[in-house]
Amino acid sequence: MTPTLIIVPGLGDSGPQHWQTLWQHKFGAARVRQDDPDRPEVAAWSDRLQTVVEATPGDLVLVGHSCGVLNIVHWAARTGGHERVRGALLVSPTDPEQPDMPQLAPAVCALAPVPLRPLPFPALVVASENDPYARYERAETFAAAWEAELVSAGEVGHINIASGHGDWPDGEVLLGEALHAWTPPDIVRF
């Protein structure tokens, strides 16, 4: 059985043309919907992710973007993960500890500090080299601490609608490669 994707959006819940929303419909993914997607809170956001994980049957792969990445790592630190989570694609992790974040996106600061411990499942971090919400060096620090693989997407902004990423076919390729690495050979893949 192919793992079910769980889309974990960041601030604003990734609008209708965001690659996460497009992937949700394309792949029949589950989605984490926060009560207030513009005001993150570690406990509430983690609890909602836990609820969706428990309600979604079968093997799971988490797909986080921006503050959704932070939600995943906080959830993993708080719960120890879940035995059915086979991996996580962590795209454009935001850095709530970045010195200019209070001016750039003050709501993100509620997700500090970022847990810097190994994740209980394999993960692939995809980071841009000119993301205004996290320096590439910080993404390298995150990936190393989480024991995740790191892929540079080049200088492509925040990998969202504003940076020209709608359907994001390169991301689908990375997702396919990650699924291949995280699932047994007899599993049907996308």
Image (cartoon, grey):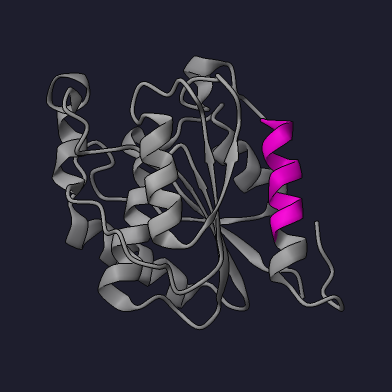
Question: Quick one: 37 or 137, which is closer to the camera?
Answer: 137
> Which segment did they paint magenta?
168-178
Screen quadrant of the N terminus: bottom right
Q: Residue furthest bottom?
A: 83
| Residue 13 position in % (x across, y down) | 39, 38
Please say whether residue 93 is visible from this viewpoint.
Answer: no
Left or right, 72 with reference to 84: left
Query: What secondary structure is the stretch in magenta mostly built from?
Result: helix
Residue 132 belongs to the span the image colors magenta: no
Q: Residue at x 64, y 43 (%)?
A: 23
Q: Residue at x 61, y 56 (%)?
A: 29
Examine the rendered structure and indicate whether residue 77 appears above or below residue 175: below
Left or right, 119 with reference to 89: left
Question: Quick one: 129 or 39, which is closer to the camera?
Answer: 129
Q: Residue at x 56, y 26 (%)?
A: 17
Question: Quick one: 163 or 112, which is closer to the camera?
Answer: 112
Question: Splitting the image into 4 quarters, where does residue 116 fall?
Answer: bottom left
| Residue 60 position in % (x across, y down) | 58, 69
| Residue 104 position in % (x across, y down) | 21, 20
Q: Residue at x 42, y 24 (%)?
A: 131
Please say whether residue 20 is visible from this viewpoint.
Answer: yes
Question: Quick one: 117 or 1, which is closer to the camera?
Answer: 117
Residue 170 belongs to the span the image colors magenta: yes
| Residue 173 position in % (x across, y down) | 76, 43
Question: Splitting the image into 4 quarters, where does residue 140 fall?
Answer: top left
Left or right, 149 with reference to 54: right
Examine the rendered structure and indicate whether residue 70 appears above or below residue 91: below
